[in-house]
């Protein structure tokens, strides 16, 4: 059975008009595909507000979450009435607003109240709270699809996606998830029903709600696409596919019609928000076609992600940036030739639970530097000072330092491997604009080169490199 999984992001369900537009897209797809499953994000901005409510409550503020609940109620009511106003939901017997959405907001208030009394929000509590955006938005989309005459059913992914209990970035257990999708959805989809499933969330074996990480609705689409054995997964967002740079930074960014798995992986991993990096693996492994398309310009073909076949055109394809990074440096002449410094460094960082997106070591072995997300920098410096206490005392290691306010800028393109002189062109372009490069790393795949620059120069660096891409085309 030809199966299509479509995911609509926050802006694509951000208002009554956007939901109406997304619903038209589903209806059109339903004409062409035998089975369609829809995954939706929370309305844009909602997850941030839910988390703000939780954090302020944990910090002792008993009022802000109540004000947020009122704002969220107004937002969802406006969307619901906007949708119902456009087409009467005469066929809908229950009121999704009263019966489904408002109870989520009551749950939000009582969870925040509990967090407020306890004075802390555990990862489990934060997941329960941040999951509520998707648990509301599915009802808006399902109501609209029903109004268009489709047999749509809102489904919470806690029923489908079984995860471990790593709250905040839970991992799916695919076999059980597949079995649940089969039994819960397959037959209904066969009959033409369209499940409208919460993105972003899953549940543990004991039924506790988990989240897959911020921006994780894309990952939900990958997981459910794989579990349903979909032929294609389409990610609907607010730009014309994956572009040569974030169009918010480089106004002349262009759509990349095709991008290989490796290229999109590097781009997503190094900060291109358009696709969550974990989305890619489940679909690549099963050879599922992955498209990124624009809800607000559906006639545009968008971007197709293709297998790595080596036939990519152009050397530099795209440039991206990860903001709010700190560059940690360990240096000292006594490190020279001493085995195990790198292993101890990254062992200590891993024990602190921090992941490292970039590492660079000079061949003199007198320093190692690596990047970590800024909120973790103090923790990382502390664990390293502890780890190397004897070496610091003997001054074999002179210092463990952190440079804050840095950004990793990454240039991506599989064709860079076979094109000499790329690094030279990149550094000249940056030099010409007076951008100072603090550290460099190139993966052995040569599919990407990453540079660390000061945050104040990050946009300039992206624009300078983007100009190289524009000139090449
Ligand atoms: P959604 O809510 O649909 O998941 P996101 O905001 O998570 O949307 O991702 C889409 C945004 O990603 C775009 O609006 C754009 O600003 C940003 N973005 C960053 N890098 C790129 C890129 N290379 N191509 C396209 N969009 C990008
Ligand atoms: N709503 C979630 C978030 O804001 C997931 C998503 O939008 O992909 O992170
Ligand atoms: Mg997103």
Image: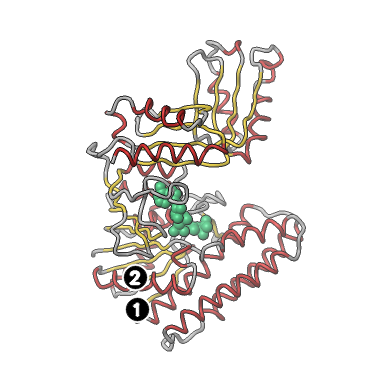
Instruction: Indicate the quadrant containing the N terminus: top left, top right, bottom left or bottom right.
Output: bottom left
343 over 172 or under it: above or below: above
Residue on which the image places disc 2:
26
Instruction: Indicate the quadrant containing the C terminus: top left, top right, bottom left or bottom right.
Output: top left
Would you say 379 lies left or right of 307 here?
A: right
**Disc 1 vs disc 2: Cβ atoms closer than 8 Å?**
yes
Would you say 294 lies left or right of 79 here?
A: left
At 34% from the left and 62% from the top, the residue drawn is 5
Coloring scheme used: secondary structure
Residue on which the image places disc 1:
150
State the SS at label 2: helix
Say few, some or many: other residues with alpha carbon within 10 Å of mark 2 (under 14 / 14 to 19 / 20 or more): some
Residue 470's x, y, as percent?
34, 42
Disc 1 and disc 2: Cα gap in Å? Answer: 9 Å
Residue 466's x, y, as percent?
39, 40
State the SS at label 1: loop
Would you say 251 lies left or right of 473 here?
A: right
């Amino acid at each position: 059975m030809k199966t299509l999984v479509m995911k609509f992001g926050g802006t694509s369900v951000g208002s009554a008009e956007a939901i109406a537009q997304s619903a038209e897209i589903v209806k059109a797809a339903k004409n062409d595909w035998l089975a369609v499953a829809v995954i939706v994000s929370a309305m844009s901005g909602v997850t941030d507000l839910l988390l703000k409510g939780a954090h302020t409550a944990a910090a002792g503020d008993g009022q802000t979450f109540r004000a947020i609940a009122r704002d969220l109620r107004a937002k969802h009511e406006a969307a619901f009435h906007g949708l119902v106003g456009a087409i009467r939901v005469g066929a809908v017997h229950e009121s999704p607003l009263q019966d489904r959405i408002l109870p989520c907001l009551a749950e939000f208030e009582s969870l925040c109240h509990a967090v407020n009394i306890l004075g802390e929000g555990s990862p489990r509590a934060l997941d329960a709270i941040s999951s509520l955006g998707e648990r509301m938005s599915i009802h808006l989309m399902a109501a609209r699809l029903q109004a268009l005459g489709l047999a749509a059913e809102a489904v919470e992914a806690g029923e489908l996606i079984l995860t471990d209990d790593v709250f905040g970035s839970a991992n799916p257990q695919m076999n059980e998830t597949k079995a649940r999708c089969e039994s819960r959805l397959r037959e209904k989809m066969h009959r033409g029903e369209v499940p409208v499933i919460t993105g972003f969330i899953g549940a543990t074996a004991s039924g506790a709600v988990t989240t897959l990480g911020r921006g994780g609705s894309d990952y939900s689409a990958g997981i459910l696409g794989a579990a349903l054995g979909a032929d294609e997964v389409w990610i609907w967002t607010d730009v014309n596919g994956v572009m040569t740079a974030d169009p918010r930074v480089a106004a002349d960014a262009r759509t990349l019609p095709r991008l290989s798995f490796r290229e999109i992986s590097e781009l997503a991993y190094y900060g291109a928000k358009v696709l969550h990096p974990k989305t890619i693996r489940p679909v690549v492994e099963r050879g599922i076609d992955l498209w990124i398309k624009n809800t607000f310009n559906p006639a545009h073909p968008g971007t197709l992600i293709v297998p790595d076949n080596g036939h990519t055109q152009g050397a530099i394809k795209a440039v991206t940036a990860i903001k709010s990074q700190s560059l940690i440096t360990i240096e000292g002449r006594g490190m020279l030739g001493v085995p195990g410094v790198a292993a101890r460094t990254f062992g200590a960082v891993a024990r602190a639970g921090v992941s490292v997106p970039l590492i660079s070591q000079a061949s003199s072995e007198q320093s190692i530097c690596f990047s970590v997300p800024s909120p973790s920098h103090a923790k990382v410096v502390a664990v390293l000072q502890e780890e190397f206490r004897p070496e610091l005392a003997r001054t074999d290691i002179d210092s463990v330092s952190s440079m804050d306010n840095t950004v990793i800028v990454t240039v991506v393109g599989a064709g860079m491997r076979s094109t000499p002189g790329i690094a030279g062109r990149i550094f000249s372009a940056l030099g010409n604009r007076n951008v100072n490069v603090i550290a460099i790393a190139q993966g052995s795949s040569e599919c990407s080169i990453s540079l660390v620059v000061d945050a104040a120069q990050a946009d300039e660096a992206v624009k300078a490199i983007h100009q190289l891409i524009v000139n090449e085309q």
